[in-house]
Image: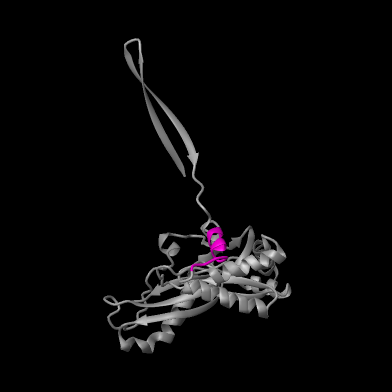
Amino acid sequence: MKIVFSIFFLLLITGCTDKNLETESVDEVIPNPQEVLRDYVKNPKTNDRICKDDIERAQKDLGKYKNIYVSTSCFGCKSLLYEDEILEYSTKQKFKVINYDFSCVIIDGQTQGCYKAFIDLEMEKVHGKNFRQKIEKEAEKLMIENIKNHDKVLSIFDLSENDKPHFIKEDNLIKQGYIPTIKTGLPLKNAKSNSIFLDVSFIIEKNGKVSTLKNENWVTEAVENEKYKSELEIIAKNTILTNYNNWKPGKYKNTIARVKNYFRVDFE
């Protein structure tokens, strides 16, 4: 953050008034929250029960396991693409992977994250400052290897816009995860006034073709439509296979990947 202090000097020269602006730029260093927490766990406040309990738990786990890698999770948080590979690689390196779940409830004066901070400090004494980055880098390499040789499937939601698979004749509706409403010819109850739809997942293969279609969700407000569920599922899947089976495949770091995608299919 730049804080600019402006000092104005009033100078009287030959009967004229002139203003000169002199500025001094100061860099204000904002501490990294993780570094602040790492310092804090060395001497937490007496009444910070959550943090002190976390540290006590960490000490017990360090007594049970020689090496620990702490993964984290919370509602709405984005996880690493290679979480599975972190577990796989860490296990090979004789690290115990333990998940720390951040609560959505924030309590004044109570600090979350002390478990991970305390464990990381202890692990750095043995494995160096960047031990987590080393594990994650190797896990990412392993994931790319799994994409290439073991058909690992990625989610479309985990990829950047440029890396996502794109339908060859893509429009805004398809980009949003929909296809045009299917006119079934079936006597569906309240089809025009109430939504009747299926959420269908499918995998876009490395060759751009669609496979492994699955009904993930079925919604109808009219009980009378339940008898058509199986038939509508067949119609939805056949429509996707027939009309939406030509994609530019997805990728991760220039590695072509199998990607799971979803369509919401409406009926009338």
Q: Is residue 111 above or below residue 221?
A: above
Question: Residue 190 location, x and y as percent?
Answer: 27, 80
Q: Residue at x 47, y 76 (%)?
A: 200
Classify residue 139 by image quadrant. bottom right
Question: Residue 82 location, x and y as percent?
Answer: 61, 68
Classify residue 148 by image quadrant. bottom right
Q: Judge whether residue 152 can be spotted in this image.
A: no
Q: Judge whether residue 146 can be spotted in this image.
A: yes
Question: Residue 55 location, x and y as percent?
Answer: 56, 73
Q: Residue at x 50, y 79 (%)?
A: 214
Q: Residue at x 43, y 37 (%)?
A: 4
Q: Nearer the viewer, residue 230 or 258?
A: 258
Q: Is residue 29 above or below residue 213?
A: above
- Left or right relative to 11: residue 94: right
Q: Quick one: quadrant of the C terminus?
A: bottom left
Whether residue 170 is in magenta: the answer is no
- Left or right relative to 82: residue 21: left
The magenta span reads 35-45
Q: Nearer the viewer, residue 218 or 130?
A: 130
The residue most toward the right is 93
- Left or right relative to 41: residue 190: left
The residue most toward the front is 46
The residue most toward the top is 14
The count of marks equals 0
Classify residue 175 by image quadrant. bottom left
Q: Residue at x 36, y 75 (%)?
A: 183
Q: Nearer the viewer, residue 77 or 100?
A: 100
